[in-house]
Image (cartoon, rainbow, N blue to C red):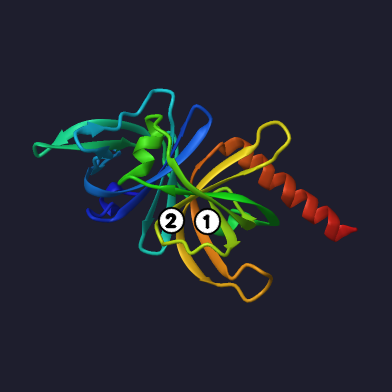
């Protein structure tokens, strides 16, 4: 993929893994150059900029026309472009074609307590620097299905697009501590919960979640064989 295919104003999705937690942040391209580098709008809150650590695992997904590209081993820094502070993303290795249909979503139908959060603007920035979200309300719901990157839930609670919801799935070893942002909502016509929501996972203990999804996938496949 040639870097001139990076279009200023287009969206990039960053996956940042730090201390076993994976965060998802969205930004937009400011500029690019041929030295395997693009510049994006600074990830910051007020005057405090987010700083990448050498130990961070950073991946970037970028959509150009109808194709999605996955960049791995990305190096992030703070730089100045035209007297403007931005984040730079350097890509040391060529990208791979990313097919989100290959990300398997497993059905769970797991009833548990969910947590509704009050979010500050740019809430994922605060999560990355270690400041916790504020729990507003607990409510009963069902985690209908889950993948590495997304989740579907059912609930009576009236939630808004863009709102953050969290829950914990009991799991052998490490429980799965998940936060996600609601990106769609609708009515549920089956069962006792009247509202259905879909979201993108913005924070998770990613390796544990990936293992959990794979084990569920294998369990379901085994049941079908029986």
Asked which quadrant contains residue 172, the reply is top right
Residue 96: image location, x then y, percent: 47, 47
Tag of residue 99:
1
Q: Within 10 Å of the Cα at label 1, are there few (<14), some (14-19), or many (20+) other Cα atoms?
A: few
Whether label 1 touches label 2, CB < 8 Å: yes
In the image, taking residue 82 as reference, residue 42 lies left or right, namely right
Residue 148 position, x and y percent, is 57, 48
SS type, badge 1: loop
Q: CA distance from mark 1 to mark 2?
A: 7 Å
The quadrant the C terminus occupies is bottom right
How would you rate the neighbour count of disc 2 (Cα within 10 Å): few for under 14, some for 14-19, many for 20 or more? some
Answer above or below: position of 219 versus 130: below
- The residue at 25%/51% (across/down) is 4
**Residue 107 x, y percent position in the rendering:** 69, 58
**In the rendered view, does 59 fall on the left or right side of 170?**
left
Closer to the camera, 175 or 207? Answer: 175
Residue at 9% over, 36% down = 83
- Judged from this view, the residue extending furthest toward the top is 54
Front in this rendered view, residue 53 or 132: 132
User: Residue at the location (67% across, 74% down)?
Assistant: 190
The residue that disc 2 covers is 68
Residue 91 in sight here: no
């Amino acid at each position: 993929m040639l870097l001139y295919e990076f279009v200023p104003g287009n969206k990039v999705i960053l996956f940042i893994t730090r201390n076993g937690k994976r965060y998802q942040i969205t930004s937009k391209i400011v500029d690019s150059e041929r030295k395997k580098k693009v510049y994006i709008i600074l990830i910051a809150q007020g005057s405090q900029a987010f700083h990448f650590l050498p130990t961070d695992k950073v991946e970037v997904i970028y959509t150009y026309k109808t194709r999605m590209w996955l960049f791995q081993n990305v190096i992030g820094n703070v730089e100045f472009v035209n007297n403007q502070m931005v984040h730079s993303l350097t890509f040391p290795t060529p990208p791979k074609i990313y097919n989100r249909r290959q990300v398997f979503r497993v059905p769970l139908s797991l009833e548990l307590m969910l947590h509704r959060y009050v979010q500050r603007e740019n809430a994922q920035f605060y999560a990355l620097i270690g400041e916790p979200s504020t729990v507003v309300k607990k409510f009963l719901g069902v985690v209908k299905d889950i993948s590495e990157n997304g989740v579907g839930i059912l609930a009576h609670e009236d939630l808004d697009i863009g709102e953050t919801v969290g829950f914990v799935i009991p799991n052998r070893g490490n429980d799965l501590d998940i936060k996600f942002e609601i990106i769609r909502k609708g009515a549920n016509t089956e069962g006792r919960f009247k509202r259905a929501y879909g979201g993108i996972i913005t924070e998770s203990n990613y390796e544990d979640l990936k293992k959990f999804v794979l084990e569920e996938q294998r369990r379901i496949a085994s049941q079908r064989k029986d």
